[in-house]
Image (cartoon, rainbow, N blue to C red):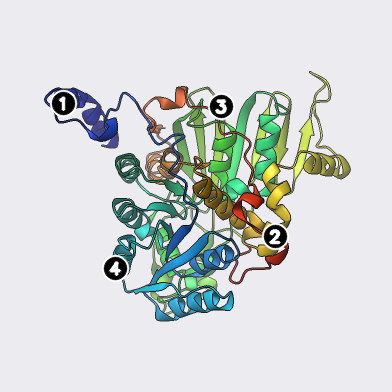
């Protein structure tokens, strides 16, 4: 259905040309689909002071309030939730850091009013999943840049709507994929950019996280909605943590693109076993059918012939892992635990990982510049080991300096659309599903992401004066 819609739009390009000839020019050529991806490499005018509105004051929303309070040139001007106690918690965090109180938006649809607030430049969206797309659309249509937790959309049509709205409004729409700023993910990126892995061939990423405790959560607990999503959906409902860092390193949308996928679900056993063991006999959840498999495995082929394996498992009793494996013609790197191997001589082979001493030497020597600049500060502030702070500091720095962001709406769409496509594939015996080209061909000429950094002096950051932030999530 989505592909048909795109073909219809492409086929209607002649209408746009006729309209322009008649004096009805489109806004900046945004709907000329022969151009493709006008938001790739796009930078907003410099924003020396960022006025931030945060929607959703749960653990993630309060976490961002705590992190940005230590950064100059950022003010949280508005906060939104439907629970008064969460609003009050965020206000206390601002008061504790001697920041002015934010305007409060309270109620189920109060986010609409925040997105129209003239004192907000950027909307930071940490709502439950069903509000991700509505808040993004309202923010951009209200003239705001918008940053949204993962996944930022769940269907192919939603992804196209976000792409088209970002292009029409000329507003950033970025997925808050914090794992792109993890230390090992950025080390991997650095090694690849330096050519030390050779020609990249295959990657593996995952979200493996035991979340069975959510079975027992009931409304108004903040996590009950997450279990409901797992109850009614299969496939990979959370693909981005493992996938997006690999995509940036493998130049997806910037020289390559995700072409097609096949996806397979295992049986569901662990949610059921957990509920039988933990819930009272009269709890209606004990009889609920759960669609989410214990393990979903998705294999992706790129246009240039690379392969990516992405896995999703939130039901089994196993340690947390994002895997983060990447191999090329000269070596391989992996995490959980960290391992690396490089061919010392062409064709010499690599039959075992480097020992801990040599692996640590490589980890230190080739640490990404962002982790060299901000890493110690980020670990002190907190947020998933520091990567949340680096992510926020980086996009704030880009807006303040008038630079393009590291990720754009096309990266959001290419990875979030897997939520729908993996479920459809798994429901149909691993049927091959085409992944849309949201850049409309611009991936062929768009330059790869470079090795980026932050100049703390330009931001006015005095790192020694910034301490740990309240409300940070560790896993």
Mark 1 → mark 3, Cα distance in angstroms: 38 Å
Residue drawn at x 50%, y 33% as measured from the top left: 300
Query: Secondary structure under badge 1?
Result: helix
Q: Residues within 10 Å of mark 4 (few under 14, many from 20)?
A: some
Mark 3 → mark 2, Cα distance in angstroms: 41 Å
Q: Quadrant of residue 157?
A: top left
Residue of label 2:
463
Residue of label 3:
306
Residue of label 4:
109
Mark 4 → mark 2, Cα distance in angstroms: 38 Å
Q: Earlier in the sequence, mark 4 or mark 2?
A: 4
375 lies left or right of 299: right
* Residue 235 in sight: no
Mark 4 → mark 1, Cα distance in angstroms: 38 Å
Q: Earlier in the sequence, mark 4 or mark 1?
A: 1
Tell me whether circle 1 and circle 3 mark residues in contact (CB < 8 Å).
no
Question: Residue 220, position in %: x, y?
Answer: 41, 77
């Amino acid at each position: 259905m989505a592909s048909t819609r795109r073909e219809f739009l492409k086929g209607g390009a002649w209408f746009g040309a006729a309209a322009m000839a008649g004096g009805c020019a489109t806004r900046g050529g945004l709907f000329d689909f022969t151009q493709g991806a006008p938001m790739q490499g796009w930078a907003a005018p410099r924003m020396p002071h960022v006025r931030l509105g945060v929607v959703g004051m749960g653990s993630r929303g309060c976490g961002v309030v705590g992190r940005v309070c230590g950064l100059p040139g950022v003010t949280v001007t508005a906060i939104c939730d439907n629970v008064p106690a969460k609003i009050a918690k965020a206000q206390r965090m601002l008061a504790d850091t001697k920041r002015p109180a934010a305007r409060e938006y309270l109620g189920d649809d109060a986010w609409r009013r925040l997105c129209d607030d003239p004192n907000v430049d950027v909307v930071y969206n940490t709502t439950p999943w069903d509000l991700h797309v509505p808040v993004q659309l309202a923010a951009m249509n209200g003239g705001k840049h918008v940053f949204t937790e993962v996944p930022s959309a769940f269907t192919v049509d939603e992804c196209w709507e976000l792409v088209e709205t970002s292009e029409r409004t000329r507003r950033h729409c970025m997925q808050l994929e914090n794992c792109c700023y993890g230390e090992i993910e950025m080390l991997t990126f650095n090694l690849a950019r330096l050519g030390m892995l050779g020609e990249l061939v295959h990657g593996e990423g995952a979200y493996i996280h035991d979340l069975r405790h959510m079975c027992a959560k009931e409304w108004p607990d903040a996590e009950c909605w997450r279990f409901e999503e797992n109850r009614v959906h299969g496939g990979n409902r959370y693909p981005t943590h493992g996938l997006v860092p690999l995509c940036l390193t493998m130049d997806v949308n910037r020289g390559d693109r995700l072409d097609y996928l096949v996806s397979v679900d295992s049986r569901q056993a662990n949610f059921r076993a957990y509920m039988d063991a933990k819930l009272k006999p009269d709890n209606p959840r004990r009889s609920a059918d759960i669609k989410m498999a214990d393990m979903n495995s998705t294999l992706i082929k790129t246009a240039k012939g690379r392969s990516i394996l992405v896995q999703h498992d939130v039901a089994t009793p196993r340690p947390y892992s994002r895997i983060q494996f990447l191999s090329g013609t000269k070596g391989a790197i992996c995490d959980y635990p960290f391992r690396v191997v490089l061919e010392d001589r062409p064709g010499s082979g690599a039959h075992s990982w480097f020992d801990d001493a040599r692996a640590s030497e490589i980890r230190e020597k080739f640490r990404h510049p962002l982790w060299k600049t901000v890493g110690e500060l980020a670990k002190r502030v907190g947020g998933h080991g520091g990567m949340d702070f680096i992510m926020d500091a980086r996009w704030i720095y880009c807006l303040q300096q008038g630079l393009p962001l590291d990720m754009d709406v096309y990266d959001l769409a290419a990875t979030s659309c897997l939520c729908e496509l993996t479920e459809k594939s798994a429901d149909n015996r691993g049927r091959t599903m085409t992944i849309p080209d949201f850049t409309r061909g611009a991936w062929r000429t768009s330059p790869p992401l470079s090795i980026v950094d932050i100049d703390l002096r330009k931001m006015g950051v005095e790192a020694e004066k910034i301490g740990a932030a309240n409300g940070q999530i560790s896993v």
